[in-house]
Image (spheres, rainbow, N blue to C red):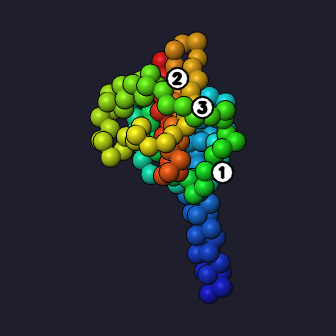
Amino acid sequence: MKNLSKFMVLAVLVIAVFLYVQINKAYTKIIDINWSISLPTSYKEIYSIDSGASFHGDGERYHIFQYAKESDINQSVNWKNNKDEYIETEIDKVLSSLNVRKENMPNFQSNYKYYTIGKDDNSKIYLIFTTDSKKLYVVEDIY
């Protein structure tokens, strides 16, 4: 009986850890489904905010993922390495509408690379990766 109790506690712990890992990595699956972008799951999510639930799934979403190494993210998309003021302005508009605090905004003064795609309905996703901090900023503006 004592061994059965220990086994049950261990089984519950294993299941809890598995579910925690799956829930934490679930958003990259959503990005893959919505945008056909396969991001590595070796990140830690350090910030998340959105405009709230909507009937059609539209709105703004913002996530910051911390990666350990730049090589973890390099092969995910076809990154552009030049700074782009238009992209910075568009991201600032979305993040301002979400009332994101300055400490959670991308630092466009540091070196970054970016990737963006849009859909026919004018929905867009912006990926900004700062090479010094190894942070990936994911900004979605969905119509």
Q: What residue type is labelled 2?
A: Lys
Q: Where is residue 131 in the image (x, y as percent from the top left)?
A: 53, 47
Residue under the image location 66 percent in, 51 percent down:
71
For the residues labelled 3 and 2, the Cα–Cα distance comes to 16 Å
Foreground tag (1 vs 3): 3
In the structure shown, which secondary structural element does the residue marked by tag 1 occupy? Answer: helix
Which residue is denoted by mark 2 in the rendering?
Answer: 124
Report the number of discs. 3
Residue 100 vs residue 67: left or right?
left
Q: From the viewer's perspective, is residue 58 above or below residue 139? A: above
In which quarter of the view is residue 48 placed?
top left
Is the Cβ of the residue at disc 1 closer than 8 Å to that at disc 3? no
Report which residue position mark 3 lands on: 80
Q: Which residue is drawn at 49% across and 31% down?
A: 83
Q: Which of marks 1 and 2 is in front?
A: 1
The residue tagged with tag 2: helix, strand or loop?
A: strand
User: Could you tell me the amino acid type at mark 3?
Assistant: Lys
Residue extending farthest to the bottom is: 2
- Residue sitting at x 42%, y 37%: 108
| Label annotation for residue 71 | 1
Dot 2, how many residues are within 10 Å of its Cα: few (below 14), some (14-19), or many (20+)? some
